[in-house]
Amino acid sequence: MRFDFSEFPFNERAFSDRPMAFARPEVTRFLTALIELMALESGPRAARAAWQAAQTANLLRHATDRSPFWRSRIGAEKALAKLPILSRADLRDQVSREGALLGPADRIAVKTHASSGSSGEPVSFFISEMNGNYNALRSIAQYLLEGRDLTLNRTRIKSSKKMIEGGLAVERERSWLAALAPYIKAGGSRRMDILRPDIDRMWAEMKKEPIGYLATSPSALESLLQRVEPIEFKRAGLAMLVLIAEPLDPEVRRRFAEVGVPARETYSCEEVGPIAFECDRCVGHFHVATSNVIVETVGEERLAVDGSAVGEVLLTHLHSYATPFIRYEIGDLAALAERCPCGHDGPTLSNIVGRTKGLLKHPDGRLLRIHIRAGDMTAIAPLDEYRVRQTGPATLVVEIGGRASLTPAETSAFVDAMRVRAGEGFSIEVRAVEKIDWGHSVKRLGFHNEIL
């Protein structure tokens, strides 16, 4: 076993110039937290299990002490797996009745947060300052766990619901690791907020500096792919795709792999933050962020997607002291294993289906993934946006945004495209609309199932 920092990109004046000190105190605290997270998630299973048991007991005790809602649910029960499942309706009830379970006397900052609304109406809840700090730390820890080059730039694309002049706003910082900036040489940071941007202008902006790590949603990436080939991303300095918010289309992953650009998906949700990170050696397998959550799955005996058994994902957020998430039914499906094929000795998820609302249900009851690519839709006809909804057991509605009308040939082409992707047995209606009503959701997903 070797543990050293011989390849770590230290600044020349990284260490302290004070007597009897090694590093600056603020840097030491940050590095200590990073090492703790990495040791916990990559260390021995027995030590990790003992830590999780202790954290679970702490959370249950806090919830019981502060909340009549949780007191009635937990009672004298000590085994997590025997507690009732927490639904979204249960969560709304607890939040509306009791508010946050941390107060001024706790001296921990608390703020209101909400889910994305991708599976329906957003759910409001409370998070503490610690939750935000953890999310930032755990994201950085993944770069260190994989040995990624910290000196590369990081470009973040984020969809916005607010009006943006020209559809694009850009913010730059000298380092994407600001907390460690005095200590190490890190790449620059660029955040691009978008709302129906001009793709050519957006790409011109991206090419101004080497892209480095591109953190984006697959839908934003597919919008760029309508005009830009993967090889052009590579030439513009793209080192890795870091996908968030939605599953990546396997075909898009394959196209980037062909030009030498790897992809990593992050499985997360607004309610708890990081859930699991894709293995760097086994595509489609995700190491659970055991420093943040305990994951369970239930119902495998009755659920299958694309013919493979999956279960309903339940999450216990170990740091959810403002609003407890204990055996929370997130609405996703996945297969859970004790370890990863790569050798990682920790819980691992695969066959993840992020929100059942993204599945197509056939009239015979089969649940299947469906991929609708932006490039395929825009190749049929000019459009601003699109969405496909399953509104009945055998009914699909295709909405084409930014069009007052469609020609018969365009309508027929969209119907044919849906039949290729969905299969036979569906009645398909195509509608031209000036603007798609996305409701409360901040995620503008290309497919939405309204019957699941």
Image (cartoon, rainbow, N blue to C red):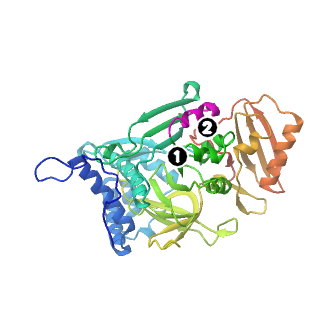
Residue named by callout 1: 214
In the figure, is residue 267 to the left or right of 27? Answer: right
Quadrant, the N terminus: bottom left
In the figure, is residue 384 to the left or right of 128? Answer: right
Q: Position of residue 429 (x, y in %)?
A: 82, 43
Residue positioned 78% across, 63% down in the render: 364
In the figure, is residue 73 to the left or right of 382? Answer: left
Give the residue furthest to the left: 19
In the figure, is residue 184 to the left or right of 288? Answer: left
Q: How many marks?
A: 2
Quadrant in which residue 36 is drawn = bottom left
Q: Position of residue 296 (x, y in %)?
A: 49, 66
- Which numbered disc, 1 or 2, marks the residue that appears first in the sequence? 1
Residue positioned 32% across, 60% down in the render: 6
Q: Is residue 207 magenta?
A: yes
User: Dot 2, how many residues are within 10 Å of its Cα: few (below 14), some (14-19), or many (20+)?
Assistant: few
The label number, if any, that marks residue 439 in the structure image: 2
In the image shown, does 237 or 346 lie closer to the viewer? 237
Q: In the image, is residue 184 above or below residue 7?
A: above
Say what amino acid the circle numbered 1 marks. Answer: Leu
Under tag 2, what secondary structure? loop
Question: Which-is-in-front pick, marks 1 and 2?
Answer: 1
Q: In the image, is residue 127 above or below residue 74?
A: above
Q: Position of residue 155 (x, y in %)?
A: 49, 42
Say what amino acid the circle numbered 2 marks. Answer: Gly
Is any part of residue 257 visible from this angle? yes
In the image shown, does 3 or 337 lie closer to the viewer? 3
- What segment is highlighted magenta in the picture? 194-209
Q: Give the Cα separation between the discs numbered 1 and 2.
A: 28 Å
Q: Is residue 395 magenta?
A: no
